[in-house]
Amino acid sequence: MFYRLFFIFIIFTGCSTNDNKNLERTSRSHRIVALEETINAFSDSVKFAYYDEIFRFQRLPAGTSIDYKSEQLSNFRIIDYKNLSKLLSDDGITARVVSEFKYYQIDEGKLRKTIFEQNWWFNPIRNKWFLKTPFPLFEKKLDAN
């Protein structure tokens, strides 16, 4: 009887697999797809001046959001926005995106172009990407006050 139980135990433990390779909550491929979707949604928000939506993408890794007053930006118009490059880190939890956009301030009318270097990070608890780099227009507008 002991040999039978031992034999059954060996069969079950020998046939079972212990896949410890992927202990992450979200796979790397899912994070890549989520990053692309997030960058596209962020780009659309910037193109159409949905400043409140832009704020939702911005959060520091400590969990605090970047606080801006979107009503101060109502006199800016973005003409063109495009992503120049995207680079995902080896660990798949941070990314760098370089964008270029052209904009003007309504009162001034002068067309300007700026490069926006974005640092994104993945929050594994929320399964979302967040931008930790402040939006450049916001900084310039706040400095003007």
Image: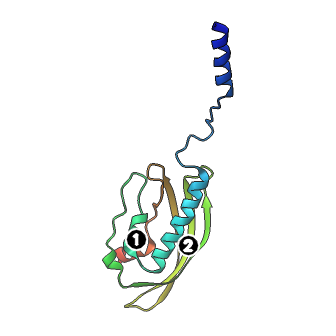
Q: Is residue 45 left or right of residue 3?
A: left
The relative height of residue 29 versus residue 137 in the rendered view (above or below) is above
The relative height of residue 4 versus residue 125 in the rendered view (above or below) is above
Q: How far from the left and from the top, in percent, is residue 3?
A: 67, 9
* Mark nearer the N terminus (1 vs 2): 1
In the picture, the quarter occupied by the C terminus is: bottom left
| Secondary structure beneath label 2 | strand
Q: Is residue 19 left or right of residue 117?
A: right
The amino acid sitting under disc 2 is: Ser
Q: How far from the left and from the top, in percent, is residue 34?
A: 54, 60
Residue at point 43%, 64% (across, down): 57
The image's mark for residue 98 is none
Q: Quadrant of residue 8?
A: top right
The relative height of residue 63 versus residue 113 in the rendered view (above or below) is above
According to the image, label 2 marks what residue? 99
Q: Nearer the viewer, residue 4 or 81?
A: 4
Q: Nearer the viewer, residue 12 or 144?
A: 12
In the picture as drawn, the residue positioned furthest to the top comes out as: 1
Q: Residues within 10 Å of mark 2 (few under 14, many from 20)?
A: some
Residue at point 68%, 28% (across, down): 15
Q: Nearer the viewer, residue 6 or 110?
A: 6
According to the image, label 1 marks what residue? 53
Tag nearer the camera, 1 or 2: 1
Q: Is residue 131 left or right of residue 30?
A: left
The amino acid sitting under disc 1 is: Glu
